[in-house]
Image: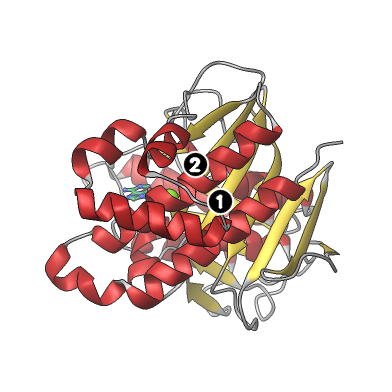
Amino acid sequence: MMNLEPIMDAVRRAAILCREVQRHHLGQSEKAGHEPVTIADYGSQAIINQAIRAAYPHDGIMAEENGKQFMELVLPEQRAQIAKLVSAVMGRVVTEADVYEWLDYADDAATERVWVIDPIDGTKGFLAMRHYVVAVGVLEAGQPTAAVMAAPAYPNTERGMMFYARDGKAYRLPLMATDGAEEVRATTYTDSAHVRVLESVEKSHASHDRMEKVRAYAGYLDSPFERVDSQEKYARIAAGDGELYLRLPRLHSTRGHSTWDHAAGAALIMAGGGKVTDIDGSPLDFTTGRVMTNNQGMIVSNGAIHERVLDAVGRVLAEEAANPQQ
Ligand code: AMP
Ligand code: MG
């Protein structure tokens, strides 16, 4: 049985760092480009990588950022700021050299078990004070088997929610609590009044038009509907706070989905009794490295409505095939 405690501790600290940056450094963004995101991204990844390497020294780590960029793209004063923030949330002195070293624990080496990290998922949401998560997934032979996810802006919470999945079960606890976890399950709702539908806020991330057609064909056009940033969408369905998350790329999009944008979410939803597949109903393929090159999109549901939604997706795909010039 895998002990996730040290990773949960790191993810909680990373979320505290993100909140700190969001509260006190975000105002600078207008004139300083993407600096606040940069600071929080590197800080969060360094903390999590360090914890994984300490607890699971033989496992692989796949993560979005790297040390070379930290040295080459981040201004010296920002690097100092990152080290200072990491020191504060870890409660020990951490130098820029430590941060640099920790960032590069991520190596993509082919190992049986790989930790997949998105230090801030939903960057646009983070910047706009909407939703974002700190996401850590575990892939074993390409299968999403465990996850730790901090959702600082989770609805109806004071300071956010922590989710984790392990041994086929999903749990949640208040983000700032260290005990009192409860098991969560996806719902069994199928009727349109109860099916809560989620999708990306950003039009560039997924096609709002295509997804509207799917909702119409599945009978969920008038259902409760919300646009939410980040993998919080997966967590909501795993925890019974949502039923359907559609992610259909814009037509002719050539941008693949990043593995770290889905590994943690997929582990959570599967452990919570929900379902995630590609848009053709096949399992998500996490075996292709950093980019999910075999993937056409994601259908995430409570399980109960999955077939019905796949049928609707199939109709949309058939129509598009019949009218290729769209
Ligand atoms: P969401 O908040 O659910 O829209 O997902 C945020 C993630 O979408 C970010 O971490 C990006 O890596 C990813 N992303 C950005 N553009 C695209 C795109 N065109 N297709 C798929 N994912 C994207
Ligand atoms: Mg992301």
183 with respect to 306 (left or right): right
Residue 221 in view (yes/no)? yes
Q: Is residue 206 visible?
A: no
SS category of the residue bearing label 2 = helix
Residue 160 placed where, x, y %?
Answer: 61, 73
Structural crowding at the residue carrying mark 2, measured as other residues with C-alpha within 10 Å and reported as few (<14), some (14–19) or many (≥20):
many
Mark-to-mark CA distance, 2 and 1: 8 Å
How far across and down, in percent of the image, does residue 83 sit?
Answer: 39, 51
Q: Is mark 2 within 8 Å of ligand 2?
A: yes
From the viewer's perspective, is residue 140 above or below residue 14?
above
Q: Is mark 1 within 8 Å of ligand 2?
A: yes
For disc 2, the marked residue is 260
Q: Earlier in the sequence, mark 2 or mark 1?
A: 1
Please report the residue visible at 47 percent of the width from the left and 55 percent of the height from the top. Answer: 86
Horizontally, residue 215 falls left or right of residue 264, namely left
Disc 1: which residue: 135
In the visual, does 273 lie left or right of 233? right
